[in-house]
């Protein structure tokens, strides 16, 4: 299991120290939650750009960018500058499959991996035809928009369904789960079939981040 630590709820004050501690604690990725105030209510654009600037100058831990935005293309361009490991866009943000394919191609042409994310109410079958073109499916296990929410159990069935489909069809794609993941439910998330988890609150708020990340892994 790989762990991506969401920096959404890292306080600005002392953020560099916190980033250093998260790296030392053994995170595999820094998860960057970009919200535009349109696709979701909150707006984290300025904060996430600032955090990426800091992270780029202090760490080699790869960035995992999650775009919860409507106008994905312009944010893809803004965040490619930070040379992330991958950029994930939302299926629901695109007008149609052609637009999604344009985003996918643009990201890949810039030597970056691509993820597609789906919200809790979106059926996983809707993106089956895109799987050959992407590297990661990010299953939202809470409604996108804020940290510290409770995992929605029914989303685990979508992970199971996707896992079965990719195994049956010999497709290689990472299944990343995002939202409300903690030490109490990580086992269920792993069993369902995801191989990367995003965790924010559970890591940031823990007494011992190293121990928490080790247990999650
Ligand atoms: C939700 C974000 C998540 C979330 C993770 O919109 O995409 O990355 O903040 O944080 P926790 O672990 O607190 O749910
Ligand atoms: Zn996220």
Image: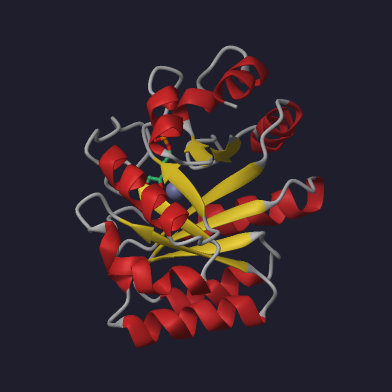
Percent position (x, y) of residue 112?
65, 69
In the picture, measured across the screen, residue 200 lies left or right of residue 81, that is: left
- In the image shown, does 110 or 42 lie closer to the viewer? 110
In the picture, measured across the screen, residue 108 lies left or right of residue 152, that is: right
In the picture, measured across the screen, residue 119 lies left or right of residue 13, that is: left
Percent position (x, y) of residue 138?
43, 53
- Kindly give the residue lying farthest to the top in the view shown: 207
Residue 213 visible: yes
Residue 34 visible: no
Percent position (x, y) of residue 204?
54, 26
Q: Is residue 4 above or below residue 120?
A: above
Q: Is residue 159 above or below residue 43?
A: above
Quarter of the picture holding the N terminus? top right
Q: Is residue 141 above or below residue 208?
A: below
Which residue is rendered at x = 41% and y = 73% of the image? 130
Which residue is rendered at x = 27% and y = 55% of the image? 41
Which residue is rendered at x = 29% and y = 82% of the image? 96
Q: Quadrant of residue 180?
A: top left
In the picture, measured across the screen, residue 186 lies left or right of residue 128, that is: right
Percent position (x, y) of residue 61?
74, 46
Quarter of the picture holding the C terminus? top right
Q: Quadrant of residue 188?
A: top left
């Amino acid at each position: 299991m790989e762990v991506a630590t969401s920096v959404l709820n890292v306080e600005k004050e002392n953020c560099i120290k916190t980033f250093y501690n998260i790296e030392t604690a053994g995170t595999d990725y820094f998860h960057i939650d970009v919200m535009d105030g349109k696709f979701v209510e909150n707006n984290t654009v300025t904060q996430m750009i600032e955090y990426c600037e800091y992270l780029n100058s202090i760490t080699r831990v790869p960035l995992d960018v999650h775009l919860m935005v409507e106008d994905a293309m312009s944010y893809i361009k803004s965040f490619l500058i930070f040379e992330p490991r991958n950029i994930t866009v939302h299926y629901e943000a695109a007008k149609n499959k052609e637009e999604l394919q344009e985003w996918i191609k643009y990201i890949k042409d810039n030597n970056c991996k691509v993820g597609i994310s789906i919200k809790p109410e979106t059926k996983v079958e809707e993106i089956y035809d895109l799987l050959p073109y992407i590297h990661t499916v990010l299953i939202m296990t809470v409604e996108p928009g804020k940290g510290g929410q409770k995992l929605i159990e029914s989303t685990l069935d979508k992970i199971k369904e996707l896992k079965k489909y990719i195994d049956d069809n010999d497709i290689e794609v990472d299944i990343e789960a995002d939202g409300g993941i903690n030490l109490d439910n990580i086992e269920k998330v792993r069993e369902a079939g995801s191989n990367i988890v995003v965790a924010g609150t559970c890591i940031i708020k823990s007494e011992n981040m190293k121990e928490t990340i080790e247990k999650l892994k």
